[in-house]
Structure formats: structure tokens, C-alpha cells
């Protein structure tokens, strides 16, 4: 099974909530309650997203977190890269020295191409898209056919 970590999934949920916040600033516990993300995990994720420049924090009694850029300018690929380190479907794409088969491997180029296609798909969807309940992405396959 190919899947994102819970941290990346929760990160997108939290950022989508911030994108929909009319006042702009959202406190960690409010974001946690609104999204169902446990508060300690929400705090950890928001801090990581701040370190990667995706959110800003405002200290004080009326503080909280807000998006660092407009939701249309933040891609899901950026979020995944910030929380997961990017897309690498096999160990050899992370570090070729970790793979015993690397010198003889006939599939690493194909895996690299597949990983790149996933990265491009994630870069093609913005936080604004994810925050829009009516958004229904269309996937265009490599041969030009559209998937539902």
C-alpha cells in the first residue's frame, strides 16, 4: 500500500482549515478541535510547517497561526516535502547506496519517473483546491487518458 504519513495527512487538514479561516489567525487548540487532529500533534505539525515557511506564528493572547502565503500559492507538494521530505517510492531514490541491487537494477529509472509523476500531481494541487469542498481533481494519465 502506498500512502502518506499521518503527519502529512494532518498537515494538509490543518492548512486547509487555516485557508478557510476568515479572520486569518487560528490558535492551535482551535485548529485541532476543528480538524480532529490531536492537539500535541497539531502543535508539532504547525511548528514544522513554520520552520519550512508555510505558516507564520503570532505570539500573545490574540496570537495563533496563519498561512505565510495565499492558499493559491501553496502546493500540496510543498506540504508533503516539508513534512515527509518529498516523494521517494523506493530506497534507491532516497539514497542509492542503501540498495544492494543498485548496480544491476533495471527498474530504478522507471521508479524515478513514477515518483516524479506523483510529485508533479502534488505540485498541481494547491491548498486553495484542498480547502474548497467542491474541488474534484482530474488526473491525466501519461498516455493522455483522464482518470476519474
Image: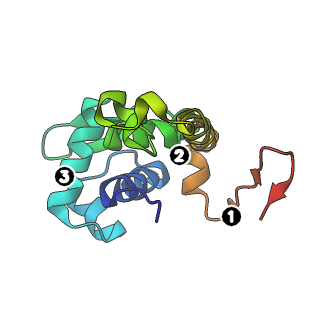
Residue 34 x/y as whole percent: 34, 68
Residue marked by disc 1? 134
Lower sequence index among marks 1 and 2: 2
Label 3: state its secondary structure. Answer: helix
Q: Residue at x 47, y 60 (%)?
A: 2
- Comparing 29 with 98, the one in front is 98
- Comparing 6 with 12, the one in front is 6
Residue marked by disc 2? 127
Position above or below: 140 against 102: below
Residue marked by disc 3? 43
**In-image side of 60 versus 131 (left or right):** left
Residue 84 x/y as whole percent: 34, 43
| Tag 1–tag 2 contact (CB < 8 Å) | no
- Comparing 121 with 110, the one in front is 110
Position above or below: 91 against 21: above
Q: CA distance from mark 3 to mark 1?
A: 28 Å
Lower sequence index among marks 3 and 2: 3
Position above or below: 139 against 66: below
Label 2: state its secondary structure. Answer: helix
Amino acid at each position: 500500500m502506498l500512502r502518506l504519513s499521518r503527519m502529512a495527512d494532518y498537515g494538509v487538514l490543518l492548512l486547509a482549515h487555516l485557508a478557510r479561516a476568515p479572520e486569518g489567525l487560528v490558535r492551535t487548540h482551535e485548529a485541532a478541535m476543528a480538524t480532529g487532529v490531536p492537539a500535541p500533534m497539531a502543535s508539532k505539525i504547525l511548528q514544522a510547517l513554520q520552520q519550512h515557511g508555510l505558516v507564520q506564528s503570532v505570539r500573545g493572547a490574540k496570537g495563533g497561526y496563519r498561512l505565510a502565503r495565499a492558499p493559491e500559492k501553496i502546493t500540496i507538494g510543498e506540504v508533503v516535502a516539508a513534512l515527509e521530505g518529498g516523494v521517494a517510492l523506493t530506497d534507491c531514490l532516497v539514497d542509492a547506496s542503501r540498495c544492494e541491487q543498485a548496480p544491476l537494477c533495471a527498474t530504478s529509472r522507471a521508479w524515478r519517473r513514477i515518483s516524479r509523476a506523483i510529485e508533479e500531481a502534488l505540485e498541481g494541487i494547491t491548498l486553495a483546491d484542498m480547502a474548497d469542498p467542491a474541488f474534484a481533481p482530474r488526473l491525466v494519465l501519461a498516455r493522455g487518458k483522464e482518470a476519474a
